[in-house]
Image (cartoon, coloured by chain):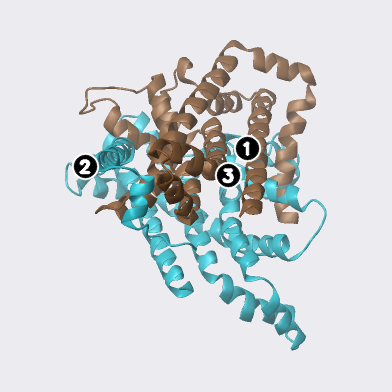
Chain colours: A cyan, B brown
Amino acid sequence: MASHVSSPGSTAAGGGTTATTWLLRVLVVGYLVMLVVWPTAYLLRHTFTHGFESLQGVLQDPDVTHALTLTGQVAVAAVVINLVFGMVVSLLLVRYDFPGKRVLSWLIDLPLSASPVVVGLALLLVYSPIYGWFGPTLRNNGIEVIFAKPGIIMATCFVALPLIIREIVPVLEELGDDQEQAARSLGANGWQTFWRITLPGIRWAVAYGVVLSLARSLGEFGAVKVVSGNVKGQTETATKVVERTYQSQDLDASYAVAFMLVFAAVVCLVVVALLRTRDEKEKA
Amino acid sequence: MIWFSLLVLIPLAAVVVKASGGGWSTFEHVLTNASTFRALRFTLVMAVIATVLNTVMGTVIAWVLVRDRFPGKGLLDLVIDIPFALPTIVAGLVMLSLYGPGSPLGVNVYGTKPGVFLAIAFVTLPFVVRTVQPVLEALETDAEEAAASLGASRFTTLRRIVLPSLTPAIFAGASLSFARAISEYGSVVLLSGNRAGTAVASTRTYSYIEGGNTAAAAAIAVVLLVVALLAIIVLDVLQRRMARHG
């Protein structure tokens, strides 16, 4: 890491006179305020126009509470699955060489830039009970994927897939495998090496990855909308409630549920920021 | 590996198979459909404008965050991440609360093209900032000082010294923004208000799925997937180049 703090001299060399500095500041702050800060603040104002009434109101609606519980359950399940899978794939990508490794790495990144609707469609084409490749067989064995919880969890896993891997891979690369080899030469088995050596080294990366995935999983909309069937009170998630209530002009409810999602997202952001500072302190 | 296949590989293969099932004619039929074509063109135009805007603004923001110091800068740094963290549907609602019906600014972008543009600009804001920022932090100021002391104007220093080292990072961020802008759905869905003129590629795909025409949906999906994959490959190549140059 090079020095973060540029000396006043370097600012003058690179940034210029106070006039340009101020111009840039105003431009940046203005852009961010108009695009992010003000709209977000306005959402909060809308939510609390009548104090806590609208929040209490939505929490008494059984459909909304069901959606919130469902979202929570799905997010936790998706994060756990992605955590296990993410660690295995990261180790695979960093510690082993095999043909097609680069292609695998591209495919893992794909969910980040693929449209959520496309993700939903892909799952639908394979698991739909009517025309999917595996769907009819699964249904005959009593397993419902699409329009049920497993489908929602799969869609959420898909979109949040790269987040944990992208955090762990660079740290694993930086760590190297000297210590792991040492442990193994001293007679530790693979499992012991992982628990005692690898995991402590990557624990902060894992922690960010988990928080980022959780934020993404709670807020997934497009992919889930396609596969869930959106049955009110059954397979409707929190983000879908926001859309439905907005479209039926129930703005108070829409803003209230959105506020809860924003709150969860901001908590995740703050946790990530705290973890980062802690990590940097530890490294220093 | 089985899980990855079940979750990602087989479903994606299914999309490609479905789209190519009807041969080239499905593609041709879908892509020449007037409203689909309009949606794709609109998506492309919006994505390009939003990417260019956020590439310029993102670079400037990264510059201010790294080189300038003023009270409240830490908060600004946190604000950048908000569009990442907010659920997309909430991002749409957030834009509507200030720029939608009953806006205190006296504008109403609900169901208009500028509305869709706002949503896309909002969600793609962090990418360039977050790719340029670390590179700028690592950049030594020696070369800039040397250039300045040799009589280069600030503009020349910026153009000849700073920008060249930032270029790969800027392009990496831009390709991420572009991929995101092309595929955006959640934030657009509220703002576009289900009007024909403001449909984007994703909403168009959704309408096809809803209408049961999965072959047509798959055809658009393949186009979107190819663009997404290209963006990733460009990114990967750029990152390798950056790593090589240190």
Q: Residue furthest top?
A: B34
User: What amino acid does circle 3 point to?
Assistant: Leu
Residue A261 in picture, x, y percent from top left: 37, 49
Query: Which one is in front, B226 or B154?
Result: B154
Closer to the eye: label 3 or 2: 3
User: What amino acid does circle 1 point to?
Assistant: Ala
Query: Which one is in front, A254 or B229?
Result: B229
Chain containing mark 2: A
Chain containing mark 1: B
> Could you tell me if the residues under marks 1 and 3 are in contact, i.e. CB atoms within 8 Å?
no
Query: Which one is in front, B225 or B219?
Result: B225
- Determine whether the residue tagged by mark 1 lies in a helix, strand or loop: helix
Q: Can residue A144 be seen in this view?
A: no
Query: Which one is in front, B165 or A56?
Result: B165
Cα–Cα gap, marks 1 and 3: 11 Å
Residue B131 in picture, x, y percent from top left: 51, 47
Question: Dot 1 corresponds to which residue?
Answer: B231
> Height in image: A195 above or below A36?
below
User: What amino acid does circle 2 point to?
Assistant: Arg
Chain containing mark 3: A
Say few, some or many: other residues with alpha carbon within 10 Å of mark 3 (under 14 / 14 to 19 / 20 or more). Answer: many
* Residue A45 circle label: 2
Question: Dot 3 corresponds to which residue?
Answer: A112
> Height in image: B162 above or below B223?
below
**Mark positioned earlier in the residue sequence (3 or 2):** 2
Q: Can residue A162 be seen in this view?
A: yes
Do badges 2 and 1 share one subunit?
Answer: no
- Determine whether the residue tagged by mark 2 lies in a helix, strand or loop: helix
The quadrant holding residue B137 is bottom left
Closer to the eye: label 2 or 1: 1
